Structure formats: structure tokens, C-alpha cells
């Protein structure tokens, strides 16, 4: 039950049975789906000599009858229209059409009517309608991802498109895994409830034949959660490798774009950071920043050894050996310089933004009590000129989430100070966050202070001390997974859809977070899976967040809400 291999298998099957030179035609979403599981060199090995976008290929008229066209598209109305126009005047020798999800009958009729030249060789559904960034982590890149924060009355059509895309993605994940789950959702979230019910309707009514797989003893579980139940995790600075790169520089479809942070040579402007293609990254993606520095030093030392042996070329045999090993040598060279650059750039950012100091206060706010000390620490950082505007905003947000009921007067003082110190601050944003994700809106025990078990666990953790002050925070997701493992996920908080219920512990659980996941949570899932407890977890979300993206979504939702004044 690994999503990267399911997606890879689909791409393999598309390409390997069609012999000869090919052009692969994708849309803006399937580009991401293919690029995270297949490299350019692998596409070349499958005789793909051209990769084009479906909307740009419509504009070109040049005939290429020597190429076979392999289309891999989402079954959207827009894509069907592109195909209709392209089939009316075929440019390629053959057309092989693959869709990432279920086609409607009407769409099949349109394609059949359009194929007057009988150029289409096959039409198939290959259910890879998700971006498998890691073996147990997928995203859907849903546009307008802030929509989940708004009531349905604000923009019903955008909300419907948002829900449709999520339901399509979830359907594809289960079709790829050949499973039909029982579905539960977070009771306090309207959008989680709506998505859970619409997914259930698709799997058990509209397309029940398609999902009628051989039953497992205990059905898998799909649990639909709302990001607003844990707004703390996406606001925190990160100190483990993959999460830190995304927080400080940004990762998009397993690629890091350096152009945003400085001038780099052409071949280093964008680098691939994939656990499937980079063994050093795979071994270190969940390690903390301090250890990464040591491990990269080891990597550099190994590379220097290899370089020395390559300089010692004395015979023709040595030369032949060097030429044979040269691709590996180049790959190693590229890998070393990539990781050294990443760590160097992140160290600079940490230094510039005083992130060690800022992060220590963030972790205290997220994990420990002590409101007086917290107020003093946040006030001092707000007064510190070297702390950036975005870090000030995050600190006040974390303080507000933690102490909204305890100290309204001090909270107002912080709001006022933030407004006076940060020119870019949009007034009312912290209050909007509390309205969205304050204590009255949340289901889970976010700060571990409602439930006796959690209070005891926090005290024990405090006494034992933590391994690292910067990574002491655990996402709420960790508790949710623990509850599932122990069979303690309460029906009253996470009801089942329909007349389904679960007897016994599920062996496969897919947790989907409406509003987006974080790399800190995907690390949590990977570590849980590595502990071999007999349950396999997969994490998915509508997007992958860092604090910048989460705050941007909040601002966008606040802007739309304000233009609909009835809501705010």
C-alpha cells in the first residue's frame, strides 16, 4: 500500500506497451502527478522525446505523424474540449488517451464523435489523480485552497469545485489501492462532513460496481479531518530536514527553486529533492538540523575520497574505469553540491531571522504552560528589531491560540503592539484565525490540557526533559493516530458515514486533512509506519503547507469574508 509505486506503475503501463517515438501530453495537474514519480531520463528511456501541455499543443499546427501521442489528462470538461479540437485535425500518427479518473458517459460520446479520422487507438482510466510526493504522503494541489474556511453561502460554486476535486482525488487513491473504506469525519467541521458524505455516495451508490473489490477482513478507514483543528503545526518553524527546506525555501512537487533566494548557476537554480531518487535525502529527510550538518560533512569527505582516486589516473585501464564511473561521479558531485547549498542557505536564513531564539519561544507556546513567561517572551521579541514581520505575526498567533481565554487584556496589548511594529500586518487577521480555529471550534485536545491522560503525559514529558528543545512539538495528528491504534477514536467526535461501523482495528488508514498537510505531519506518519504496529497510515491533503502558505490562505479567506460582510 505505497502510493508512489501505484502512480509509477500507471505511468509505466501507459508508456511501455506503445512502441516507437512518443510525445507525452499532460495538463497543469497531471504534470505534477507524473513529475514526482518519473524523472526526465526515465521518460527518455521509454522513448518519450517530447513533453507538452495540452493547452499549448492546441495552438501548434505542425504535423508530426512520426510521433505517437500519449495523453494523460484529468477528465475535465476543458480537457475534453481540447481533445475534441485536436482530434478534428490530427497532427500525430496515433492517439492513446489515458484519464486520471472516472470518465462520464457523455465525455466518452464526445470523444467517439470527435474521432472522425479514427486516430484514437485506446481510451483508458488510470487512477493516478493524486500527487504522491512520498510513499505515504499525497497532495491534490486544489486551487483556491482557502475556500474550506468560508461558509457555503459565500461562494457555493467555488466550494463545490473544491469538494469535487477532493472527492475525485480520494476516489482515485482508493481505486489505485483497490480498496473501499468505511468513512469517518471530524464532527465539528461542515466541510469534512460534506466531503465524507459525497465520497461515501460515490463509492457506495453512484460507482459501487467500480469499488466492489475483494473484501478484507476489516475494511480500511478513511478519516476526513479539518486543518483548523490543528492550526499550530503549520505556524511553527521546522528543524527537521525536509520540513525545514519547505518552511525556509519552499518545495513544490519535490523540487526546490533557488531563484527566490539568490543568484545561482543555471544547473543549480532548481534541484530535485525526492526520497525515491536521492539516497542521502531518503536517509536524512527526518533528521534534525544539527545532525544533518554532520552527515553532510561525511558525504563531502566520501566525495573527496572518490575525487582523489579519480585524480590518480595513470594507465589506460584507469582511464576506462573513470569513464565508466563518470555518470555516477557526476551524480555524486551534483548531490553533494545540492545538499551543501541547501544547508548553507538555510543556515544563513536562521542567522538573519534569529530563528533559534524565535523558535524556542514558539515551542514553549506550543508545548508548555506558563502564560506570564510566554507573554514576556513574545513582548520582548516583538520589540526586537532583528525579528522579521512574519515571525512577529506567527508568535502572536501562537500566543492567541494558546491563551485566548486566559488573558484577553494581555492579548489586546499584543495585538496593538503587533499593529504598531509590523507595517504589513493586516488588522484583524489574528482575530480571524481565532474565529476560524479558536478553542470553541476545535475537536481535538490541541494543547493537551483538556484530557487527564494528556495532562499527565505532558507533565511526564516535562520531567523527563526533551531530546531537543526545537523539536519537542508533536502535531495533533500524532494523538489521532495513537487513538486509532488503541481503538479509542470516539464515535461522538468522529462519526461514521452511513450505516457502516468498524469491528476490530483497521490495518490500513488514510487520513485526509482538508486545508492541507505539513511535512512535520508526514514525518509523524512515516515514523509511525516504521514502528511496525500492524497498521499502515497514509496522509493526504488539499495542499502542502508551510507557515507562509497557511497565512496566505488565512489572508485570502479574510479578504473574501470581508467583501461578504454578512459573515464577519
Image (spheres, grey):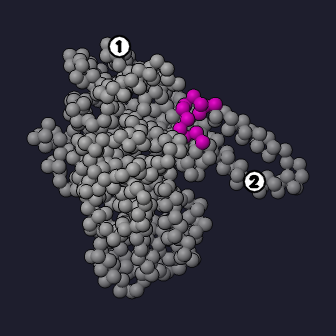
Coordinates of residue 557 in the picture (x, y in percent): 23, 41
Instruction: Give the vertical position of 404 relative to 229 (above or below).
Output: above
Coordinates of residue 145 in the picture (x, y in percent): 30, 48
Q: In which quarter of the image is residue 449?
A: top left
- Residue occupying image coordinates x 52% and y 70%: 13
Coordinates of residue 307 in the picture (x, y in percent): 76, 42
Q: Quadrant of residue 225?
A: top left
Residue at the farthest right position? 315
Coordinates of residue 194 in the picture (x, y in percent): 23, 52
- Residue occupying image coordinates x 41% and y 49%: 505
Q: Is residue 249 magenta?
A: no
How many other residues sit within 10 Å of disc 1, few (<14), some (14-19) or many (≥20)?
few
Which residues are drawn in magenta?
A: 283-294
Q: Name the residue under label 2.
A: 325
Instruction: Give the vertical position of 193 relative to 49 (above or below).
Output: above
Q: Which mark is residue 373?
A: 1
Amino acid at each position: 500500500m505505497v502510493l508512489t509505486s501505484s502512480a509509477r506503475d500507471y505511468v509505466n503501463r501507459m508508456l511501455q506497451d506503445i512502441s516507437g517515438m512518443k510525445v507525452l501530453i499532460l495538463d497543469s495537474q497531471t504534470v505534477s502527478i507524473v513529475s514526482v514519480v518519473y524523472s526526465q531520463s526515465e521518460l527518455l528511456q521509454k522513448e518519450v522525446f517530447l513533453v507538452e501541455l495540452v493547452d499549448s499543443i492546441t495552438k501548434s499546427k505542425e504535423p508530426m505523424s512520426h510521433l505517437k501521442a500519449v495523453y494523460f489528462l484529468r477528465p475535465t470538461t476543458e480537457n475534453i474540449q481540447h481533445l475534441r479540437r485536436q482530434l478534428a485535425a490530427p497532427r500525430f500518427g496515433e492517439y492513446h488517451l489515458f484519464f486520471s479518473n472516472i470518465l462520464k458517459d457523455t465525455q466518452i460520446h464526445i470523444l467517439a464523435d470527435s474521432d472522425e479520422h479514427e486516430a484514437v487507438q485506446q481510451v483508458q482510466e488510470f487512477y493516478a489523480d493524486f500527487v504522491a510526493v512520498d510513499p505515504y504522503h499525497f497532495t491534490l494541489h486544489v486551487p483556491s485552497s482557502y475556500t474550506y474556511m468560508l461558509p457555503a453561502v459565500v461562494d457555493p460554486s467555488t466550494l463545490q469545485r473544491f469538494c469535487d476535486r477532493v472527492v475525485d482525488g480520494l476516489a482515485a487513491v482508493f481505486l489505485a489501492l483497490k480498496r473501499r473504506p468505511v468513512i469517518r469525519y471530524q464532527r465539528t467541521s461542515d466541510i469534512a462532513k460534506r466531503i465524507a458524505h459525497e465520497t461515501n455516495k460515490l463509492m457506495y451508490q453512484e460507482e459501487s460496481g467500480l469499488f466492489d473489490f475483494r473484501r478484507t477482513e476489516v475494511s480500511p478507514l478513511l478519516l476526513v479531518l479539518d486543518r483548523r483543528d490543528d492550526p499550530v503545526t503549520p505556524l511553527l518553524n521546522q528543524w527537521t530536514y525536509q520540513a525545514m527546506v519547505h518552511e525556509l525555501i519552499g518545495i513544490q512537487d519535490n523540487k526546490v527553486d533557488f531563484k527566490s533566494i539568490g543568484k545561482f548557476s543555471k544547473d543549480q537554480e532548481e534541484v530535485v529533492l525526492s526520497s525515491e531518487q536521492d539516497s542521502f535525502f531518503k536517509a536524512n529527510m527526518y533528521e534534525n538540523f544539527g545532525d544533518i550538518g554532520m552527515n553532510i560533512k561525511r558525504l563531502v569527505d566520501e566525495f573527496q575520497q572518490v575525487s582523489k582516486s579519480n585524480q590518480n589516473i595513470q594507465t589506460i585501464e584507469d582511464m576506462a574505469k573513470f569513464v565508466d564511473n563518470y555518470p555516477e561521479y557526476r551524480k555524486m558531485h551534483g548531490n553533494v553540491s545540492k545538499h551543501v547549498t541547501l544547508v548553507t542557505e538555510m543556515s544563513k536564513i536562521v542567522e538573519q531571522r534569529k530563528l533559534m531564539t524565535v523558535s524556542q519561544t514558539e515551542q514553549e507556546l506550543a508545548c508548555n504552560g506558563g502564560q506570564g513567561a510566554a507573554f514576556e517572551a513574545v513582548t520582548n521579541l516583538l520589540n526586537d528589531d532583528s525579528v522579521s514581520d512574519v515571525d512577529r505575526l506567527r508568535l502572536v498567533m501562537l500566543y492567541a491560540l494558546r491563551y485566548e481565554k486566559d488573558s484577553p487584556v494581555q492579548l489586546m496589548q499584543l495585538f496593538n503592539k503587533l499593529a504598531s511594529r509590523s507595517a504589513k500586518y493586516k488588522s484583524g487577521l489574528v482575530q480571524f484565525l481565532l474565529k476560524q480555529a479558536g478553542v470553541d471550534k476545535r475537536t481535538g485536545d490541541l494543547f493537551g490540557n483538556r484530557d487527564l491522560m494528556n495532562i499527565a503525559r505532558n507533565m511526564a514529558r516535562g520531567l523527563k526533559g526533551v531530546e531537543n528543545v526545537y523539536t519537542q512539538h508533536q502535531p495533533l495528528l500524532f494523538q489521532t493516530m495513537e487513538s486509532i491504534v488503541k481503538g479509542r477514536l470516539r464515535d461522538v467526535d468522529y462519526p461514521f458515514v452511513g450505516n457502516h461501523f468498524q469491528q476490530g482495528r483497521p490495518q490500513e488508514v488514510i487520513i485526509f486533512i482538508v486545508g492541507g498537510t505539513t511535512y512535520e505531519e508526514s514525518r509523524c506518519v512515516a515514523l509511525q509506519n516504521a514502528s511496525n504496529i500492524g497498521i499502515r497510515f497514509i496522509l493526504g491533503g488539499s495542499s502542502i503547507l508551510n507557515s507562509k502558505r497557511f497565512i496566505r490562505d488565512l489572508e485570502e479567506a479574510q479578504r473574501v469574508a470581508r467583501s461578504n460582510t454578512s459573515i464577519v
